[in-house]
Image (cartoon, helix red, strand yellow):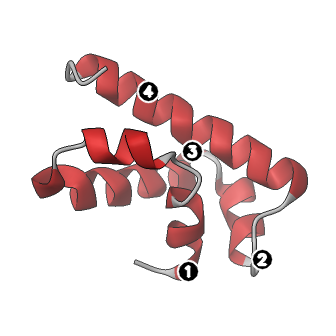
Amino acid sequence: MDKTAKMIIELVPDEVMHKIPFFVRGHATKGTVAKIAREYPELYAQAQQCDELQGELKEQLSKIINDIFDQKMRKHGYK
């Protein structure tokens, strides 16, 4: 996983990550980051240029990734 993906995944609270079964966690996180890169290329490009996510960029990416995980958790009955 690259630096940008790690920074984005770190925006997901630990309690949410621990609800995802360990055997699909890698697939779920990589797939979600890929979805963000596809659907929000401008935000992903900005994140790639940062050493650390800050300010509005961090808030936007946090909302996006947590909304995606919330939808997935509800869909699969983990919430």
Q: Amino acid at mark 1?
A: Lys
In the figure, 79 relative to 72: above or below?
above
Sequence-first tag of 3 and 4: 3
Dot 3: element? helix
Q: Specify whether 38 is left or right of 21.
A: right
Q: Is residue 66 above or below residue 58?
A: above
Which residue: 59% across, 52% down?
A: 11
Cα separation, mark 1 vs mark 4, equals 23 Å
In the rendered image, residue 27, in percent from the top left (x then y), is placed at 23, 57
Q: Are marks 1 and 3 in contact (CB under 8 Å)?
A: no
C-alpha separation, residue under disc 1 versus residue under disc 3: 19 Å
Q: Secondary structure at mark 2?
A: loop
Q: Position of residue 51 (x, y in %)?
A: 75, 81
Q: Are marks 3 and 4 in contact (CB under 8 Å)?
A: no
The residues bearing labels 2 and 1 have C-alpha atoms spaced at a distance of 10 Å
Q: How far apart in space, not on screen, are marks 3 and 4 (Cα)?
A: 17 Å
Label 2, label 3: how many angstroms apart (C-alpha)? 19 Å
